[in-house]
């Protein structure tokens, strides 16, 4: 994850306080300069309380003029992260699609469906493909491979859309 992706995950409560040193290390690796994030990145497990970790994280972000996005924007950033992870091969198509489907479910209150489920994140096709795995007859691995290939292509589309 990039720093911005960590911040998005943080906004949605997907980063545990114990993971903040790793996120701070990512910021330093990306070339950001912050005393608070350096202290956070160098902290040892159990050395700081959860509130101290959170304080260092938030102060470091303020120092970098980074804001924690709203839930809708955080969801869009994470949608792109998961789609990119599928395209790069870091995540299997079904696993990446599952993460994106969970995002759509989690954000249904801020990105309500207008016409169909997931349209707030542009996920109609991905949702259909993901759930089509449920309809594959037992033992038909070729069908699963084909669906996964289509999921990967849909993730490529989502990735390009997120970059625009």
Image (cartoon, rainbow, N blue to C red):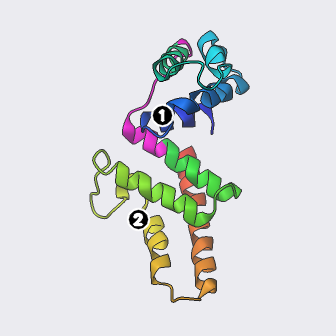
Would you say residue 12 is visible in this rendering?
Answer: yes
Mark 2 or mark 1: whose residue is earlier in sequence: 1
Residue that carries the numbered disc 2 in the rendered image: 124
Tell me where residue 150 sits by quadrant: bottom right
Q: CA distance from mark 2 to mark 1?
A: 26 Å
146 to 42, vertically: above or below: below
Q: Is residue 110 above or below residue 61?
A: below
Q: Position of residue 45 (x, y in %)?
A: 62, 26
From the image, which quarter does the C terminus lie in?
top right
> Which residue sits at x=58%, y=84%?
143
Kindly identify the residue that appears in the image at 32 percent across and 48 percent down: 111
- The residue positioned 54% from the left and 12% from the top of the image is 63
Viewed as shown, does residue 14 lie left or right of 149?
A: left
**Residue 68 included in the magenta stretch of the image:** yes
Q: Is residue 121 magenta?
A: no
On the rendered structure, is 35 left or right of 123? right
Task: Find the magenta span and give its range.
Answer: 63-76
The quadrant the N terminus occupies is top right
Q: Secondary structure at mark 2?
A: helix
Mark 1 closeness class: few <14, some 14–19, many ≥20 residues within 10 Å? many
Q: Position of residue 147 (x, y in %)?
A: 57, 76
Task: Name the residue rendered at 43%, 55% in the picture.
Answer: 102
Name the residue nearer the viewer: 118 or 47: 47
Q: Quadrant of residue 51?
A: top left
Residue 78 shown left or right of residue 38 in the figure: left
Q: Which residue is mark 1?
A: 10
Q: Nearer the viewer, residue 151 or 106?
A: 106
Q: What number is the disc on residue 53? A: none
Q: How many marks?
A: 2
Q: Is residue 154 visible?
A: no
Whether tag 2 and tag 1 are in contact, CB under 8 A, the answer is no
The percent coordinates of residue 95 (x first, y second) are 56, 61
């Amino acid at each position: 994850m990039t720093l911005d992706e960590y911040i998005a995950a943080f906004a949605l409560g997907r980063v545990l306080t114990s993971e903040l040193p790793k996120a701070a290390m990512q910021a330093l690796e990306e070339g950001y300069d912050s005393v608070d994030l350096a202290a956070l990145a160098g902290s040892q497990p159990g050395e700081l309380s959860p509130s101290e970790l959170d304080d260092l994280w938030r102060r470091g972000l303020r120092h970098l003029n980074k804001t924690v996005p709203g839930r809708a924007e955080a969801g869009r950033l994470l949608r792109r992260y998961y789609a990119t992870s599928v395209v790069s091969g870091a995540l299997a198509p079904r696993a990446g699609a599952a993460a994106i489907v969970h995002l759509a479910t989690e954000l249904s209150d801020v990105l309500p469906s207008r016409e169909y489920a997931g349209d707030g994140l542009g996920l109609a096709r991905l949702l259909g493909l993901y759930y089509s795995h449920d309809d594959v007859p037992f033992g038909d691995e070729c069908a699963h491979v084909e669906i996964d290939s289509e999921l990967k292509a849909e993730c490529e589309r989502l990735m390009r859309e997120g970059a625009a």
